[in-house]
């Protein structure tokens, strides 16, 4: 019988050396793996990025601060490496919010004994965090000067679809791989 190793042992917003190290490692992983993406035609530069699944995973496993850092810094580095600079800073914040919200969701869920149920809850919690966190892209109305309709049809909707598929499939897979390792280390 499995127990979820994500029960908080410290305050939700605590910053420790563990938080900093895992946040930095996660941001680096997300930045490098996030380069393997492609643009969705007909959108406002929305990309399919399977590496996005790392954002809610790090939020779940290492907390709110680490999740926020992975999303914010990882996405900013991807944008810099792809040549768009910090033009889309609000998308980096939205990615950070996904990680932070995932951290909050999973910090307050009770431990789950069933492996299958834990993976389903991980998928649904990650999808919820993605849907809520990406709402920050509504700021494109002011940043890009586009209409609210365009924000939802050309930005938010395609991003939620692409990232939602990634987190529903890959975040539980990452979590299933991590669970035995976390039990061995006692974390």
Image (tube, rainbow, N blue to C red):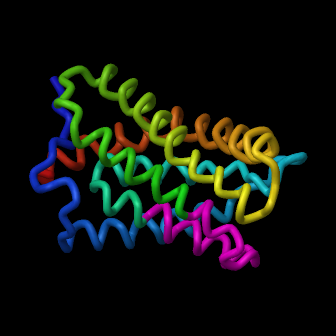
Residue 60 in magenta stretch: no
At a point 62% along the width and 60% down the height, the residue shown is 91
At 50% across and 66% down in the image, what residue appears? 72
- Main SS, magenta region, reads helix
Q: Position of residue 52 (x, y in %)?
A: 55, 52
- The quadrant holding residue 164 is top right
Give, as a single range, the part of the protein colored magenta: 70-92
* Residue visible at 50% across and 47% down in the picture: 133
Is residue 86 depicted above or below 144 in this figure? below
Quadrant that contains the N terminus: top left
For residue 3, above or below residue 24:
above
Question: Residue 95, position in %: x, y?
Answer: 53, 56
Residue located 17% across and 30% down the image: 110
Left or right for 55, reference 81? left
- Left or right: residue 34 versus residue 57 is right
Task: Answer left or right for 101 relative to 81.
Answer: left
Percent across and percent down for residue 177 are 35, 42
């Amino acid at each position: 019988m499995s127990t979820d190793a994500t029960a908080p042992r410290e305050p939700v917003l605590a910053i420790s050396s563990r938080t900093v190290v895992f946040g930095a490692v996660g941001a680096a992983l997300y930045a490098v793996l996030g380069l393997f993406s492609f643009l969705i035609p007909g959108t406002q530069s929305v990309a399919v990025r399977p590496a996005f699944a790392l954002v809610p995973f790090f939020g779940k496993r290492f907390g709110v601060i680490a999740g926020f850092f992975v999303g914010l810094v990882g996405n900013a580095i991807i944008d810099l490496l792809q040549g768009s600079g910090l033009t889309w800073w609000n998308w980096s914040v939205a990615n950070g919010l996904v990680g932070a919200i995932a951290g909050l969701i999973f910090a307050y869920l009770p431990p789950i004994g069933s492996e299958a149920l834990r993976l389903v809850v991980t998928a649904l919690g990650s999808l919820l965090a993605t849907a809520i966190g990406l709402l920050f892209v509504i700021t494109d109305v002011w940043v890009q000067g586009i209409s609210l309709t365009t924000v939802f049809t050309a930005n938010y909707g395609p991003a939620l679809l692409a990232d939602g598929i990634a987190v529903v499939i890959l975040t539980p897979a990452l979590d299933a791989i991590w669970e035995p390792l976390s039990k061995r280390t006692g974390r």
